[in-house]
């Protein structure tokens, strides 16, 4: 019944909005005695995707509600990765290290503030049975669509055909229906609305396309197409160049992929808390829900808002990050709306 109802919902996108109007505390810059890491809160020009959703940064105005559907509560969350187009080995390793860092809770393996602590906010969401979003994530299978099976200009619908093709071509483990698909498109692939309105989206597959209903997310590498839109703040709009603010240096020296990682985090957080688009979202319209990542778009630390991204860290090489992952990796992840604090939250919070 629920599924039949769901399938009547028009195909929708999860828009990535720039958050320009978070109630701002005074931006501050704090220098620590630790010479390895400096804290700073840079003021940056806004991203070029303007906000289509109203959010004033006050919990009174955020009407995030639970709509009785499931969350991704079974452990572990199996991710089936689909690499569409040409990907470098080091790029794949970087993205996989991020995904595997989500369940790296051992502080010796990933010191605080960590990716796992960042995901802790997502795990605070529960379904009607009281089951929390799982804290355990594994990469359960991978498929490389090296030959661009559906060309290098995908539509929202052909993304599902890419999944169908991957499922047919690669014998996935028999239990793969207990998971989610993550489709990542290479920098030479255009996707409908990519760069103009979205940097990524999540939805679920249709039986007519893939054979069954399973949640999926798509995120594109914007490095060559629109880094100032989708790899913000590692690239900023061109009109600001010349004496204005400079883009932040990406933690892993890859503007496109470092930018994707924050978008992947955003989409996974929303997918986990709203996998069939009938669980956690704000707003009355399920075709344009405001989800737990949307509420904190553009916010990476304490004191963010009004053009400030919030207090993040900078290493001795000048590279910006706000969380640690496995194998010494560092990432810059946007914050997530906490149902407990009723505010955006992240493990690098200063208060
Ligand atoms: C589950 O979510 C509830 C409500 O947000 C929270 O109080 C609790 O700590 C969570 N449990 C786990 C194991 O994360």
Image (cartoon, rainbow, N blue to C red):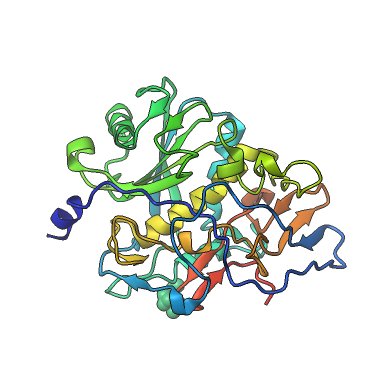
Q: Residue at x 74, y 41 (%)?
A: 241
Residue 304 found in image quarter: bottom right
User: In the image, residue 102 lies at what x, y percent?
Assistant: 52, 56
| Outermost top residue | 147
Q: Residue at x 27, y 74 (%)?
A: 129
286 left or right, relative to 1: right
Looking at the picture, tell me which residue is in the foreground, 52 or 221.
52
292 left or right, relative to 127: right
Looking at the picture, tell me which residue is in the foreground, 82 or 345.
345
Q: Quadrant of ligand 1?
A: bottom left
The answer to whether 5 is drawn above or below residue 211 in the figure is: below
Camera sees residue 53: yes
Residue 82 found in image quarter: top left
The answer to whether 248 is drawn above or below residue 53 in the figure is: above
| Outermost front residue | 239
User: In the image, residue 154 lies at what x, y percent?
Assistant: 38, 30
Tally of marks: 0
Looking at the picture, tell me which residue is in the foreground, 118 or 9.
9
99 left or right, relative to 290: right
The answer to whether 123 is drawn above or below residue 185 in the figure is: below
The N terminus: image quadrant: bottom left
The C terminus: image quadrant: bottom right
Q: Residue at x 23, y 47 (%)?
A: 213
Camera sees residue 99: no
User: In the image, residue 314 lies at what x, y percent?
Assistant: 77, 55
User: In the image, residue 179 lies at what x, y percent?
Assistant: 33, 49
The answer to whether 29 is drawn above or below residue 261 in the figure is: below
């Amino acid at each position: 019944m629920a599924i039949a109802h769901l399938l009547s919902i028009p195909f929708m996108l999860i828009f990535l909005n720039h958050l320009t109007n978070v109630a701002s505390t005074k931006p501050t810059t704090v220098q620590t005695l630790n010479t390895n890491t400096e804290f700073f809160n840079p003021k940056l020009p806004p991203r070029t995707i303007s906000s289509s959703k109203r959010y004033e940064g006050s919990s009174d105005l955020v009407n995030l509600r639970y709509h009785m559907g499931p969350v991704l509560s079974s452990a572990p969350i199996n991710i089936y990765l689909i690499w569409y187009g040409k990907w470098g080995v080091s790029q794949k390793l970087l993205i996989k290290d991020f995904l595997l860092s989500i369940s790296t809770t051992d502080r010796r393996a990933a010191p605080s503030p960590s990716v796992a602590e960042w995901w802790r906010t997502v795990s605070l969401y529960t379904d009607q049975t009281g089951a929390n979003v799982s804290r355990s994530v594994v990469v359960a299978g991978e498929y490389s669509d090296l030959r661009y099976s559906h060309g290098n200009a995908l539509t929202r619908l052909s993304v599902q055909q890419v999944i169908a093709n991957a499922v047919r071509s690669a014998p996935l483990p028999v239990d793969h229906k207990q998971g989610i698909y993550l489709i990542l498109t290479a920098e030479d692939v255009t996707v409908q609305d990519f760069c103009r309105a979205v940097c990524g989206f999540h939805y679920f597959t249709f039986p007519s396309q893939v054979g069954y209903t399973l949640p999926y997310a798509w995120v594109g590498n914007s490095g060559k197409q629109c880094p100032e839109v989708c790899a913000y703040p590692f690239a900023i709009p061109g009109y600001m160049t010349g004496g204005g603010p400079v883009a932040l240096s990406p933690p892993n020296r890859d503007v496109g992929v470092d930018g994707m990682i924050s978008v992947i985090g955003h989409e996974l957080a929303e997918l986990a808390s709203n996998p069939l688009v009938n669980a956690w979202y704000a707003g009355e319209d399920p075709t344009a829900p405001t989800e737990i990542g949307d509420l904190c778009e553009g916010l990476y630390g304490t004191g963010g808002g009004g053009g400030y991204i919030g207090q993040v860290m900078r290493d001795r090489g000048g590279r910006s990050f706000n969380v640690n992952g496995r194998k010494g990796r560092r990432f810059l992840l946007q914050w997530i709306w906490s149902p407990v604090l009723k505010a955006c939250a992240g493990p690098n919070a200063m208060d």
